[in-house]
Image (cartoon, rainbow, N blue to C red):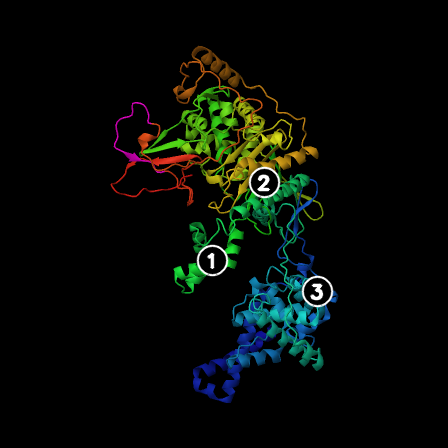
Amino acid sequence: MTFPASLRARWALLWPRLARLARRPERWASAHGLLWLLAALALAVFLYVLALIPFTPAISDIRKAKSDQPAQLLSADGRLLAEYRWVNREWVPLDTIARPVVDALIATEDHRFYDHFGLDWRRTASALVRTLGGDKQGGSTITQQLARNLYPEDIGRAPTLTRKIKEAITALKIEWLYSKDEILETYLNTVPFLYNAYGIEMAARTYFNKSADKLTVLESATLIGMLKGTAYYNPVLNPERAQARRNTVLAQMKKRGKLSAAEYDKLVKRPLRIRFERQNEVAGLAPHLAQQLRRQLIDWADRNGYSLYSDGLVIHTIIDGRLQEIANQAVQRQGRQLQGVADAAWAPRSAWGAKSPLVQQLVRESPQYEKAVAAGTAPEEAAKRLLDDAGFLRSLRQAKTRVQAGFMALDPRNGAVLAWVGSRDYGVDPFDHVQAARRQPGSTFKPFVYGAAFAKGMLPTDELMDTTVEIPLGGKRVWRPTDGRTPPSEEPMQLRDGLAYSKNTITAQLMQQVGPERVAQLARAMGVRESKLEAVPALALGTSSVTLKEMVAAYGTIANGGRYMAPQVITRIEDKNGRLLEAFKPASPERALGLAAAQELRDAMRGVVDKGTGVAIRSRYGITADVAGKTGTTQDNTDGWFILMHPQLVAGAWAGFNDGRITLRSDYWGQGAHSALPIVGDVFRQALRAKIIDARERFIDEEESSWIATATGTLRNWVYDLFGRPTGEQAGPAGAPPAPQPDLPRAPAPAASAPPQEERPEIIEAPLIPLQEVAPRANAPAEPPVWVEQPAPEAPQPAAPSAAPGVVIVPVVPRPQGAAPLLAETR
């Protein structure tokens, strides 16, 4: 910094005198010395202030918030999906704000506002004297408060001299550039009032359910009174404090001539009347998707020198506004239906009671319990108080037993995401059940097992015996998949029927032949690329948790002939004037599954809706288009899934609860065919009626185009003609020529008049029994009596990592003499 010549000259005269005083320190005690000391201190402060000026914010436009334009997220048909705002605020001009608001503000916070130039020296000195006397006082003017509110990062809030100087400098800048009315308007439109309400307009709506121009004297005094401490004087949680503070504001208004004594005496006796209504931001059609995209868009804006919240960016997506609205409505309708089931299942007089072990556990996990224990209450006493509190138990039940759902749809031809619904209501539950939630997919994972088998050379017409299966896992453990309470038919069944009827016994045998690692690799290649998959036999029945987005993308690979297309949402970004800033192209397709195997898998999945567990798509929703899909239900009906494929649309839904220990407690409603399928069926039916997709469009089988594929198919058929097709457990390992097999009779097709077999909940309930009594294997070596641990249905526990729906993990260990059996549920 360069100082003026006159200042340098004075310093040259001053320095010798200071040097003489330094050599004779006793002269500082004289009046002349004290005068020089004060002059030196003043100079130091002046220089310090000059040094701080470059570190204070540049005042270009204090009303920038008024002109801020949040980025808009638009659908392909131009509908608003969401807006990206800094805060929940609506700017209103000063002349439309009720006059009592301005009078209360000036009378209470800065009664000499129109007389000073940003700093009130008398008030600052008075506040300093009172603070030194032990009564801490604030001396900031309205302009200083505005500077602190507008630039919290540059100025800060620490109680230091540096912060106060920077605040004063910024206030002087503001007063130099703007009028008093502009300062007042900006202050009233930017000050926070709790509950995500910024500015006087949103505060008026939040606390009094009216606009700022309709506020009365009492209401104005209440809101202005909050500014001293919004949390401490919160009229919702602390009404007595808020009323006392309101009366203080009224007294200041009387003192400054804004109220007569008679008016004050009448108003001060009135009660505090609040009409509280939280003002949520406009969510738009796809709020969950908007939140998932927020971080990516912020990163893009930072890289390119834009602000997502103020520069008016327009982000165009591939979301179909009509389909998104249809999906929102379908999720809400089915959510209400399932909520009625859940409310009946968890009624206070039945399952939800203070004596329930699960309820007791949930109480001990609640924030209220942790707060009571942290305050010194004994754990048992805290739990007892909460269990005796009917209001608390009611609110806990409403929170824990609220049914949730997620839905996603995409175009399999290019990966375009067409609809995204993260929950029943974003305002109640903003958690995204499409991309953020990971749940066990159950039987919706089975197509990966069948796809791996078809890629290996097996055909949908190949047959396996529907019989009891026991698969050693090593470490004296056995995996025994079942089909719920339905016993095996002990008859051969074609693979396509095993998939259509969701047979666990068939799928487990197929997994043996293909291998878990191959299935996991295929699932990752087809789209399950973010979740960890455990390559264990139980993976065949969907034991590894995945997201709905991953599953829908993987089914899109099936519908697209085995070519994976990464899901795409954004197509281009424009500025507020419509100028293109960047365009985004679809990702290149990746071959994940051979064309022939993908088509065989897709054709086999047609049977799910034609005669299997998803037949309601035809019978209930009347969908005659060419579709294929799969249902899924996990242990104890915890998660319900359904995904449906059409040449132009793949859509999937999940239904359940945020807490996996809570279920619908119904063998009927808990199935994916009855919880998730109606959402997808409803969307598809309306999409066909609205001609969003073409009912005449069909999947078309293509021929392998490469000479390698042709040669491979020819060689495979020659081997089959020579040795026969691989069936049963005699099929060789991956890559080995199939061994000769006897022809097995085909499984009889279900009678046309017989109702379709619904997918049963894949669980098993059995008492503790010796292993020898459970289907002993032939020629098994003699073993001492051992015991099987079966699930205990009364007390659900968190899922074991390698457990599966309808699976019993059997630790085979000798039972100690006199020891009690260990009952542990597995999923």
Which amino acid type corresponds to the residue marked 1 in the rendered image?
A: Pro
Magenta region: which residues? 776-789
Q: Is residue 20 magenta?
A: no
Q: Secondary structure at mark 1?
A: helix
Q: What type of secondary structure mainly makes up the magenta span?
A: loop
Residue indicated by mark 1:
367
Instruction: Tell me if residue 36 comes above or below residue 671 in the rendering.
Output: below
Which circle, 3 or 1, is nearer the viewer? 1
Distance from disc 2 to disc 1, alpha carbons, whole Å, reads 30 Å
Residue indicated by mark 3:
212
Q: Quadrant of the N terminus?
A: bottom right
Distance from disc 3 to disc 2, alpha carbons, whole Å, reads 40 Å
Q: Which mark is residue 637?
A: none
Instruction: Tell me if residue 205 comes above or below residue 564 in the rendering.
Output: below
Which circle, 3 or 2, is nearer the viewer? 2
Instruction: Tell me if residue 312 comes above or below residue 757 in the rendering.
Output: below
Which amino acid type corresponds to the residue marked 3 in the rendered image?
A: Ala
Number of numbered discs overlaid on the protein picture = 3
Q: Secondary structure at mark 2?
A: strand
Q: Give the mark nearer the N terminus: 3 vs 2.
A: 3
Q: Secondary structure at mark 3?
A: helix
Residue indicated by mark 2:
407
Residue farthest right in this picture: 95
Q: Position of residue 300 (x, y in %)?
A: 59, 46
Q: Position of residue 780 (x, y in %)?
A: 29, 25
Q: Residues within 10 Å of mark 3 (few under 14, many from 20)?
A: many
Q: Is residue 782 magenta?
A: yes
Residue drawn at x 56%, y 37% is: 674
Residue drawn at x 48%, y 48% is: 351
Residue farthest bottom in this picture: 30
Q: Position of residue 329 (x, y in %)?
A: 64, 43
Q: Residues within 10 Å of mark 2 (few under 14, many from 20)?
A: many
